[in-house]
Image (spheres, rainbow, N blue to C red):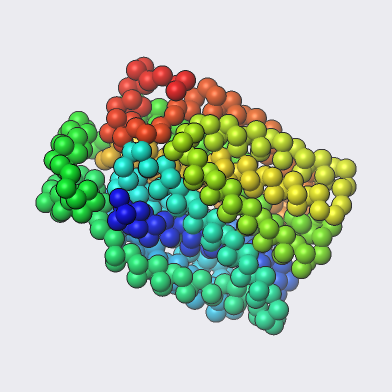
């Protein structure tokens, strides 16, 4: 089990680069808009938003290398993409070049949301799968916290401080790529490619002294039940497809990525100074980390569905309070405190659950394709919503924006109550049987 934990942690470091890359741009936001004299629309969609469009492409096409060359090799290429993006962004001298290198980093983010959870879910025992896959989310929020902290520490390094903010990511990207050489290939992926002896060797390393033949036969049985040229859009896979769509849809309709990208701007809109806004962003990162740890601890104890209930209620309360703060012009620390509650709700609910849940609900041979669909839904919305924030804030105002997010979370609560099944403690092969044969599944579990 110790080896599985170490391998899971290494694979989950892709999440650290994901979190760092997503948020590091927030420290350079206003500096870049001023430097290149960009309009709100151009700045939001090109300078700030291009990484997210890279993420969309990474999510759409990331399932291809994850299936073809395997989870491990895809994870290695993800590290290389992040390294290239960091160096290129730091040395960019115009907004188009900057956007191209941010797009490359986005490819790494999108692909990581497929390859890392797929790899971890396929090596993890059922009883610990939730918390091991949730290591990925923990590393995302650790990356977010370190990015906020890095931006704060580098804020006074001169007029080109943004270059240091963007370039420092090259260091963890390089270290991560070296670590990937230490992990084995996924045994379930190897078996799906009929590389049985390699898979048997990995399983014996994972479970020394155990009879691995029983697990191999169960995986083979699951693989043999499929027909050639299957895809996730077949009628029998409708249930996992719908579940993946809605959990990804509601994740972004909470406004989480919009907030993470623009937290210093949001705090300044609420009346805080620039330095205080950056410092408050570090508080957001710390809150995210603490409550993600709580979510990781609870996900295999309480289950995915209970955490989603807790998060949904917290979302509704916190987002409603943020909207009220802007409508009623509450000053000082009111908005940061309400947004801390929002981040806590996200971390313990959607944050802890989304990548675990999507990695569980598709059968072995379609896992990468299913995750690509869920990730693509997530990242298309994650590209559109933050890109619109500068325009929406300057037209309808932040109060209306946050009220809309609060209303959407009421619908998420209904999704959890009516459609979402519990998946804790069930083997991947057993989950495939239950979710593909919808009429035999009890959604009240």
Residue 290 shows up from this direction: yes
Estimate the x, y position of residue 232 in percent, counting from the top left: 34, 35
- Does the image show residue 380? no
On screen, residue 82 versus residue 206, left or right, reads: right
Q: Nearer the viewer, residue 261 or 1?
A: 1
> In this rendering, would 295 be left or right of 45?
left
* Identity of the residue drawn at 11% across and 51% down: 197
Residue furthest to the top in view is 439
Instruction: Please say if 287 is above or below 318.
Output: below
Of the 4 image quadrants, the one containing the C terminus is top left
- Seen from this angle, which residue lies furthest front? 209
Closer to the camera, 334 or 237? Answer: 334
Q: Residue furthest left?
A: 197
Q: Where residue 320 sits in the image (x, y, percent)?
A: 75, 37
User: Is 21 left, or right, of 198 in this rendering?
Assistant: right
Where residue 167 sits: x, y (%)?
54, 75
Rendered image quadrant of residue 173: bottom left
The percent position of residue 352, horizontal first and vertical second, equals 51, 44
At horizontal 34% and vertical 70% (from top left) the residue drawn is 178
Rendering quarter of residue 231: top left
Where is 361 relative to 275, above or below?
A: above
Q: Is residue 14 above or below residue 295?
A: below
In the depicted view, which residue is nearer to us: 11 or 190?
A: 11
């Amino acid at each position: 089990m110790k080896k599985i934990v170490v391998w899971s942690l290494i694979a989950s470091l892709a999440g650290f680069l994901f979190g760092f890359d997503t948020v590091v741009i927030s420290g350079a936001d206003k500096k870049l808009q001023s430097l290149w004299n960009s309009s709100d629309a151009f700045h939001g969609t090109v300078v700030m938003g291009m990484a997210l469009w890279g993420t969309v492409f990474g999510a759409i096409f990331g399932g291809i290398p994850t299936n073809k060359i395997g989870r491990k090799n895809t994870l290695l290429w993800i590290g290389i993409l992040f390294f290239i993006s960091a160096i290129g962004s730091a040395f960019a001298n115009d907004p188009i070049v900057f956007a191209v290198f941010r797009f490359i980093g986005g490819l790494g983010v999108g692909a990581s949301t497929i390859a890392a959870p797929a790899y971890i879910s396929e090596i993890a025992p059922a009883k610990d799968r939730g918390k091991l896959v949730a290591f990925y989310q923990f590393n995302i929020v650790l990356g977010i916290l370190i990015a906020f902290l890095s931006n704060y520490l580098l804020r006074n390094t001169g007029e080109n401080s943004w270059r240091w903010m963007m370039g420092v990511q090259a260091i963890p990207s390089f270290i991560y790529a070296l670590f990937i050489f230490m992990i084995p290939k996924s045994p379930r992926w190897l078996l799906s490619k009929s590389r049985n002896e390699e898979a048997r060797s990995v399983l014996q390393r994972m479970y020394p002294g155990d009879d691995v033949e029983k697990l191999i036969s169960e995986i083979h049985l699951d693989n043999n039940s499929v027909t050639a040229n299957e895809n996730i859009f077949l009628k029998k896979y409708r249930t996992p497809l719908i579940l993946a769509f809605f959990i990804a849809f509601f994740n972004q309709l909470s406004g989480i990525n919009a907030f993470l990208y623009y937290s210093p701007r949001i705090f300044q809109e609420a009346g805080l100074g620039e330095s205080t806004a950056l410092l408050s962003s570090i508080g957001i990162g710390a809150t995210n980390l603490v409550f993600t740890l709580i979510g990781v601890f609870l996900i295999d104890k309480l289950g995915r569905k209970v955490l989603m209930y807790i998060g949904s209620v917290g979302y509704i309360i916190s987002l409603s309070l943020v909207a009220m703060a802007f409508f009623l012009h509450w000053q000082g620390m009111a908005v940061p405190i309400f947004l801390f509650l929002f981040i806590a709700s996200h971390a313990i609910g959607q944050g802890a659950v989304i990548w675990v849940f999507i990695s569980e609900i598709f059968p072995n041979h379609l896992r990468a394709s299913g995750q690509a669909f869920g990730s693509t839904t997530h990242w298309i919305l994650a590209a559109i919503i933050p890109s619109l924030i500068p325009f929406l804030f300057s037209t309808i105002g932040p109060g209306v924006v946050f009220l809309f997010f609060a209303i959407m979370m009421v619908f998420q609560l209904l999704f959890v109550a009516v459609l979402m099944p519990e998946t804790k403690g069930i083997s991947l092969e057993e989950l495939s049987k239950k979710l593909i044969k919808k009429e035999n599944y009890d959604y009240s579990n």
